[in-house]
Image: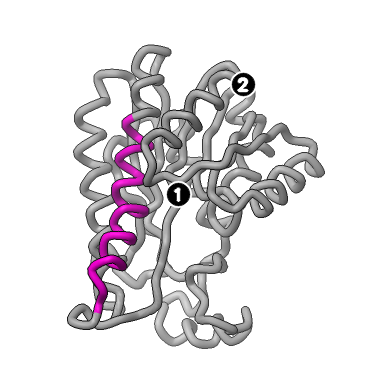
Amino acid sequence: MRFSGKVALVTGGGSGIGRATARAFAAEGAAVMVTGRNEGALKETVELIDADGGQAGYVIADVTREEDVAAMVRETVQRYGGLHVAINNAGVLTPPTPLADLGTDTWRHVLDVNLTGVFLSMKHEIAHMRTHGGGAIVNTSSNIGAHGRRPGFSAYSTSKGAVSLLTRAAAIDHIADGIRINAVSPGANEGPMSALPGESHEERAARYASLIPLGRIGTLDEVSAAVLWLASDEAGFAVGHDLVIDGGVTA
């Protein structure tokens, strides 16, 4: 129960890594607020946590809108009495498109959600934490931000590489405020963003088996365990770190 008495905010908490991480925090004693744009998915996450005996709520928020971000932090604090941990996980992945064919609106949308959304979230989370005893922030980046070798994903790769750099810069800015900021960079995993349209779990696993040195995709539990470690007191000396979990792809 590493997070007993703590409050955790998870953006993009309606599916995949966000949902798994929210459930993991709740299982270790945290009161969890999940946010996103899909109310039905958020409700399902809360129901799963309730069924597990945990405590959770949700708030609709678009991380590209600063007023939404300010409101999600404010509502979290009002409902649960504080904010100790924030997981900035909301992200978007568009269909693969060569850079020369990529629409400007698509480029802006990917960077707005994946990068500006993390900036806005940290800005408002830090504003609370720096005056209330500090806290821990973990941003979801991606191993593709380090290598960029996935054809057709120039916008996504750029956004995630920038998230990793933003994490390091923000960590140095705010460690004196008692706030530890780190990132996790998953590779292919069981989350929906690693699958092709209409692809089954078995087909996805087979497709990645020969591409990952470990021979398999990652599980959501493996990713969420890394996030919880970075947010916990066990990682008290980790500052500005980008923890890559990709089965050896970037080794």
Main SS of residues in magenta: helix
Label 1: few (<14), some or many (≥20) within 10 Å?
A: many
Residue type at tag 1: Asn
- Badge 2 is on which residue? 80
Callout 1: SS = loop
Q: Earlier in the sequence, mark 1 or mark 2?
A: 2
Task: Please report the residue visible at 35 percent of the width from the left and 54 percent of the height from the top.
Answer: 114
**Residue in the image at 32% along x and 31% along y:** 123
Percent of width and height locating residue 124:
37, 28
The residue closer to the viewer here, 112 or 22, is 112
Is 122 magenta? The answer is: yes
The image shows residue 151 at horizontal and vertical percentages of 28, 82
Q: Residues within 10 Å of mark 2 (few under 14, many from 20)?
A: some
Q: Is residue 179 visible?
A: yes
Indicate the amino acid at tag 2.
Answer: Tyr
Quarter of the view holding residue 49: top right
Magenta residues (range): 102-123
Identify the residue under disc 1: 89
Is residue 203 covered in magenta? no
Residue 218 percent across, percent down from the top left: 52, 67
The quadrant in which the C terminus is found is bottom left
Mark carried by residue 241: none
Report the residue at 45% width, 70% height from top.
188
